[in-house]
Amino acid sequence: MLKLVFISLCVVALCLAKPATRDVSFNDRPIIHTTTGWLQGTTESCGLFCSYYSFRGIPYAAPPVGQNRFRAPQPHPGWSGTRDASEHGASCPSGSRLSRVVNEDCLFLNVYSQDLVGRRAVMVWIHGGSFSGGNGDSFTYGPDHIVDDNVVMVTINYRLGALGFLSTEDQHATGNYGLKDAIMALRWLRANIANFGGDPDNITIFGESAGGAAVHYLLLSPSARGLFHKAISQSGSALNPWAFQTNPRDVAFQLARDLGFNNIQTTEQLINTLRTVDPMRLVEATPGSMDYPIVRGIRPIPFVPSVDPPGTTGDEVFLPRAPIDIMRDGQFTQVPYITGYTSAESLVMIRELLLDPSVFPTVNANPELMVPFWWNVAPGSAAAQSISRQIADFYWNGVQLHNDIREQWTHYLTDLMFVWGIDQTVRLHASRQQQPVFYYRFSFDGSLNMIKRLTLLTAYPGAVHADDIFYLFSVTSIPPPLLPTNEAIMTRRRMEVSFNDRPIIHTTTGWLQGTTESCGLFCSYYSFKGIPYAAPPTGQNRFRAPRPHPGWSGTRDASEHGAGCPSGRNVETNTNEDCLFLNVRLFLVKEVIYLLLSPSARGLFHKAISQSGSALNPWAYQPNPREVAFQLARDLGFPNIQTTEQLINTLRTIEPSRLIQAVPSPMQYPIVRGNFPLPFVPCMDPPGTTGDEVFLPRAPIDIMRDGQFTQVPYIAGYTSAESLVMIRELLLDASVFDVVNANPELMVPYWWNVAPATAQSIARQIADFYWGGVPLHTDIREQWTHYLTDLMFVWGVDQTARMHAARQSQPVYYYRFSFDGTLNMFKRLLLLTAYPGAVHADDLFYLFSVTRFPNILPPTSDAATTRRRMVRLWTNFARFGNPTANQDTLIQVNWARMTNANEFLDIDTQLIPGSNPFQERMAFWNRLEAQYG
């Protein structure tokens, strides 16, 4: 009888905590014995009165290299002495450029336990990533919440992509190596987990997406029987179409052809050849579709599990029959089982549609593409036409696909690619086993639905694929926002440190107790966070200059950051209008040019650095602030306000989050995406401004021309491809090029006062200079971003550097950051690695430790060298006023101050002194401004 338990998960509350840096004694470095050798772990924090033992990077199998590539894993031979288990092992090679250090020797697991004595339940996590990416590291799958429930948690690495799943359908390559790795890991755990305080007779395997499908495959595999006792599959099943390969031999030969091996005839020759190929080249190659056209969102994954070839024996046995046949016969491991899905799995495909706008026209012209590709239905046949009509009628009432029904399209994809297979799975298991099966949907849509937030899909209801991960794990690679219910716990979090590690100092507003934090080997610093430097700007203090803080009694805990100021960003951490806090621990200067121009800031600083920002950038100055303020009031529903006093009194009553999330509509000029001005940015002081309210008495350009600015040593510069990010923006608004082609005057700077005929002439000159005068089209998107880079960033920065250098005696240093490496995270996250250069804000990752993105680098890599070099230049400047004052093996050039010779430094793989490489582009804009500006 079918027995299903269906639960809608709508409320999840977990204590969020991040392990604290602390000094440890020998007792905090536990040593235990395993069948393969001795291990020394570490002790880490998981929150208030919570700590656990951590053993990372434990090898559970021999390295799958050389002749062991494309074979089942072999037992690890063990090691002598005591192995340091404080760091993760290498990740398995994958097509993901966001992975940490990778190596084909990657079969490691990690164990986290609160006590090494006793027998606690064990949970073994199998990560997702389309069977082609990911790892088990704690950056994404932190154990804090799970171990705090008195459970031993384990995460594993397994082989990915072609290295993990290539099959020739014969004895030369039987496939499924990644899942055979999981079996080897479970065997190692069965023999050793008791030494970590775990119960070898109470092991639960769980995973999400490809990891959820992997868990299901382990239930189906005869080789995994007896190695676990419960199972959880999140958003993944062997019946999902992306999780099973029906033609692995064809895919293997296609891979060889794509790699340039066109004359291979036999599977033995194929495998011997592929064993010689660099592993990264192997996993990054993705064979094209085999014998059917498939639109984005339904395409299969080439290297995933497949049926064992006939005659497979011994350790190579994993999946003797097709998953559906094993399930129908009930020939699977029967254990208590949880499985389910998120309510909007494929909602992320709305973003994918922006990457490939041809999907809807293609499907409208070829509706049979909606028919599952694995069904035996001939394309173009009457059956295919009938099925596609029924699908369209059911999901979007049979109309032609268009952008207004994108969400309905994702419902179809969610069901086809996820829910239908999971639903079949749960019904087949529940009807064929005595052990209970529990069925769920995760629908909660909250602050920790980070995938949804990062893909900018918060306007749509539901939880997207992988959103549930953030409610299980401490994900330090993306910092989750703090929930209000967790704030008290976070601020009370215990750090086991001595009094000397909590320094106490006196300030004019009261006593502060900080912390000591680590910045690497033999490196530490004192940290004082959340120091209020002004009274809360609330009530009548809203829209006024800040007031001095009245101070506090006792000693203020300065171990945690203060609230962030309200903003329009949905991914912000905890915010409050009482947000005027500072942190003393690091050198942070950006967009400082206004402080150089303001008379109120004189004497408060002694050097300045502006990275990718100037008061002369068009987005950084508002010439019409009064109009913007009244437009904001109208947009908020106050159309009848007549006076500025009435306006401000009204706006002081508005909830701050509503106030900052409202963006006034454009004022008096049409502007295409990429040139939009920012409504609320610095502006000139009103006439008659006095006292604390004085900041900018004249326009920036006038102050600079007169040299009436603070004259201190100054660094200014930009990244080499600032506006390359606009390639992604063009996907969000495909109309930009059509609009500009029809209205070329939109390319003219909106703040220039030029007549229509003159605007047409300027537009022709811009088009001729940047893209040869042809109409804009997608093949010249990069040239469009060059124009935006110059107009919105480089031209203003260049003018700033020249005017300061010409009007002050203190040195000005001018630079371009061009390095394109592992830490160019914005470029990587935006999938722009095919284009050269560094995008806007890429340079930040070479100055700061950004914990939301793990950046462990080989110390000799170009990226690590560039990071040390960038920090050295900036800190030399802070100490000496000269970025190349101390020359050594890291800094071997002289960065000359800027003069009429336009001295310049290009920060790339090497430091390259010279002249601005964009000099011709700047001359073009200077000439236009002289004629028309």
Image (cartoon, rainbow, N blue to C red):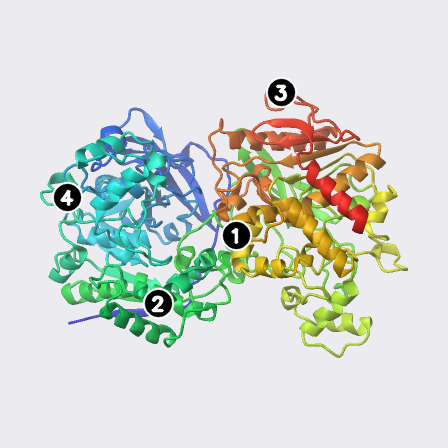
| Residue 385 percent coordinates (x, y) | 27, 70
Sequence-first tag of 2 and 3: 2
Instruction: Give the class, few, some or many, for how many residues have Cα within 10 Å of label 2's Cα (few <14, many ≥20).
Output: some
Amino acid beneath label 3? Asp
| Residue marked by disc 4 | 317
Q: Is residue 238 left or right of residue 804?
A: left
Q: Residue at x 82, y 56 (%)?
A: 684
| Residue marked by disc 2 | 412
Sequence-first tag of 1 and 3: 1
Residue 178 visible in this rendered orientation of the protein: no
Sequence-first tag of 3 and 4: 4
The disc placed on residue 888 is: 3
Between 391 and 806, the one lying in front of the other is 391
| Residue marked by disc 1 | 778
Q: Which one is closest to the eye, mark 4 or mark 1?
A: 1
CA distance for labels 2 and 3: 61 Å
Instruction: Name which quarter of the figure residue 805 lies in.
Output: top right
Classify mark 3: helix, strand or loop.
Answer: loop
